[in-house]
Amino acid sequence: MLNKLNVKKLYFLIGPLLVLLIIISCVEKPTTIDLSGVWEVKLDSTNIGDSEDWASNKFVGTSIDLPNTLDDVAIGTPSTLEPAINNYVMSNLTRKHQYIGKAWYQKEIEIPASWKDKNIQLGLERIIWESSVYVDGNLIGSANSLVGSHNYNLTKSLTPGKHLLTVCIDNSNKFPLINVAGTMYPDKVNQDMAHAYTNHTQIKWNGILGDMKLVASDNNTPENVQIYPNAELNKLKVIFDQSNDVGESVKLIIKSTDGIEVYNNKVMVSKIENNQFVLEVDKPSNLELWDEFNPKLYDVEVITNTGKAGARFGYKFISSKDGDLLLNDHRIFLRGNLECVIFPLTGHPPTEKEEWTTLIKQAKAYGLNHLRFHSWCPPKSAFQAADEAGFYVQVELPHWSLKVGEDQKTTAFLRKEADKMIKDYGNHPSFIFMALGNELQGDISVLNEMVAHLKPKDNRHLYATTAFSFQQPTGTRPEKEDEFFIAQWTAKGWIRGQGIFNAKPPHFDADYTSGSAHINMPLVSHEIGQYSVYPDMSEIEKYTGVLKPLNFIAVKNDLEKKGLLDLAPDFTYNSGKLAALLYKEEIERALKTPSFDGFQLLQLQDFPGQGTALVGLLNAFWESKGVISAEEFSQFNSELVPLIRFEKAVYENGELFEATIEIANFYKELDDQTIDWTITDEANNELKKGTLSEVNLAIGNNTDLGKIVHNVNVESAKKLTITVSLKDTKYKNSWNIWVYPKNVSTTDKSIVFTTSITTAEKALKNGKKVFLNPDPKSLKGITGRFVPVFWSPVHFPNQPATMGVLLDEKHPAFKKFPTDSHTNWQWWDLCINSKSVIVDSIAIKPLVRVIDNFVTNHHLTNLFEAKVGNGQLVFSSIDLYSKLNERPVARQLKHSVLEYMKSTNFKPVNTISMKDIKSLVEKNKQTDFSAKDIYK
């Protein structure tokens, strides 16, 4: 029998154990196992590995910390390429190590006892291209996806205890027909162009990125929660999956991300099909709408009879009406930019939200509100960052093909990818557009059928068959199932500057209405810009990751060899200034076009692939090249932009400058506003000013708000600046015009001006000052163009490929000719009526240097000086002799050069011969070039 003493002793023995058991029972059991960390990897590029043997037994390979790629740890074949200007090197940045094929990753794991009888799922967030999973040597299954996680149900295979987990990843091309081939690149591995699988931006890495985890849950718990606002913005529908019945009602809780509860109630629920359930409630009154100005997010939780599940969302509805793009029933305008997986340190997209947040913050600083993910879909972290920033995104299938529909397996793969995208990312409010790929061609009916399948399945996004197409008529008008239309031209003409800015004199009273007004759905201009900027040699040292900038190094070596390296920073800056000028006009024309709903730049940052397409005002790291600041760029690229329409860039004394003021307002309605305008000269002297009062600004295009009128009255040439601003706000914008006197001398008795080389030779022999101006068409060289290289001289070699002018604006030759050091609008007539002559072997001093493209790197000029025999020469391959009464800029430049030649400042240093001059004469007829020729 127990006496009191024994009971007391027993209590002291058992009590602590009971307490410990109680504590253990209260500790939350782990529901996830993080698989990141050290794995073993073994390569199998020849596909001879014994899967049963390799997956059944622990192998000794190379240790790798996952998530990671083989490139990151220098596993693969080392590159043997050397810097050289050829299509191997200039194709793209060079992988330091490259591996294509199967790689086996293995790790021993331990499953806790608490997971007995649990549902166990394996998720591997991002893989290229195919994965196969084995547990203890048994194949569980395989997955193919380029758009999202590879998921496996391991419930039957993972009992409590230790197991050998093996993942085989094959990054070889599984569906070649999703990719257009860039056949100009001789290395076959570099011919795939779609950005989900390419070496041009993202690389064809092998590895695992992002989340790697096992998740345990009770069986039959809810999952896949999808939240749907309605078009009227007064309801909220929630759909979720559960494998068993949920009863008549579930609890629905909605909280803001800062913890404020906006809904908590039981809600009636009904079954749809396939274990899907739906509930619908009235929109809570304090549930705010999501948009770029109010990126409010909420967490939804559904609690059923078996468990709970949740998702984050923003309450928004994207739609269109009368051809306008609407968000929450208000018109929006997409100021977009392409994102093509350009991350040059890693060669793969970041899976951490912080990196995307930084990128989007920089994009917003430059006035953007939209990213188009060209032929790929980013990881969830990109959507999360965009949701929080109020940034709109367009995602696409991993698809850029000229053979749509030719292969049924490819089509089936793409259908599956599309369904996965809307399931995995559909709740993200930033996800407003989805296209089935880039510039698709082939059986367009297949694309229409795919869009018809997606639209009723998920109405939270708008869908398009393709982001533009060169196939007609597809590329010129919307397809049957399109809900938005992306184009660079329509049947009625160009709707981007590529076919205009070189063909027509500068004019600022135009928009793209003539080519777009008939399109009765949201219209976004396709890949506008593509103005090449000269490579920045200082960028080379930034490439400290998996890619080598052999293309940049090759250009640097060539410049050094040709004695041009010291000019490289000037080439970058001045070509960049021309590009910025053109991007400004591209954007402003789009903003002026009432039938436009946005544009997509190609692009703000460099594209280091496809022939080294350095079209950015920022480098590939999203860093400024020092060409234009975010503040300057956002003056013409913002939610509210003052604009003016005026006839031309160049005026003569006695003419009337007249401009109409308008404002593109996609911010909010603003009443009783004041608009100020000024005209100033280069010394910032105010020549005229004015004010518009009591202006009401609606959402959209506010046109004909008032006029600026100025009588041009000058005795000397001047550059003027017109500025329009919205009073007491940050919103302002400015433009330049150039004004010239009509009566200036264009002859001088002391100088022989001639178009004849023979006449020039005689005069030079006699020790005269000679201004030689042959017909530009009679000269060898590159046909003069105002616009720079389009995209890349490697990718599009069929184009006159220069990159603007470079000069010393303070040189006395330009004392009477106001100019910048770079091409500006007043140079249009001079550039178009010129020839850039190659003077590689002629020792002259250019007064105007023409920047050559970075493949040929010639010494180019269209105006130079030299000593020839006993005489002194200025040579112009710009037409400065014909119709000067109609060409005030040419007249003024000729006058300024003659004044310089008369002065004591004219003292040419370099000596050349008449043979050198005669070598510039062309003997063969040259052909004309039009903008569409580039695609031939």
Image: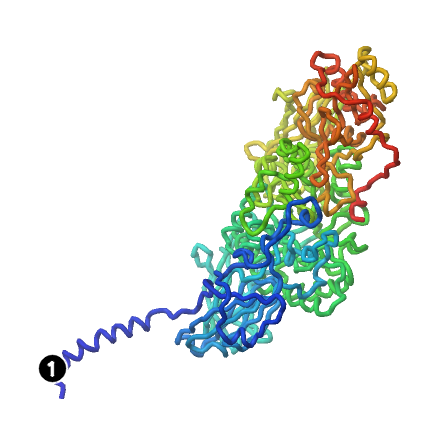
In the rendered image, is residue 675 in sight? yes
Quadrant in which residue 830 is drawn: top right
Residue 41 position (above or below residue 901): below
Residue situated in front as seen by the camera: 157 or 267:
157
Query: Which residue in the protein does label 1 denote?
Result: 4
Image spot of residue 48 (x, y percent)? 61, 71
Crowd class of label 1 (few under 14; some 14 to 19; many from 20; radius 10 Å): few
Identify the residue shown where x is 52% and y is 53%: 288
Residue 873 position (above or below residue 164): above
Identify the residue shown where x is 52% and y is 78%: 244
* Secondary structure found at label 1: helix
Describe residue 566's horizontal placement relative to residue 888 as left or right. Answer: left
In the rendered image, is residue 231 in sight? no
Describe residue 771's horizontal placement relative to residue 607 as left or right. Answer: right
Describe residue 201's horizontal placement relative to residue 485 as left or right. Answer: left
Q: What amino acid is labelled 1 in the image?
A: Lys
Residue situated in front as seen by the camera: 51 or 637:
51
Image spot of residue 769 (x, y percent)? 79, 15
Residue 236 position (above or below residue 680): below
Identify the residue shown where x is 82% and y is 11%: 749
Image spot of residue 642 (x, y percent)? 64, 35
Image spot of residue 841 (x, y percent)? 75, 30
Name the image quarter holding the N terminus: bottom left
Residue 466 position (above or below residue 883): below
Render colour scheme: rainbow
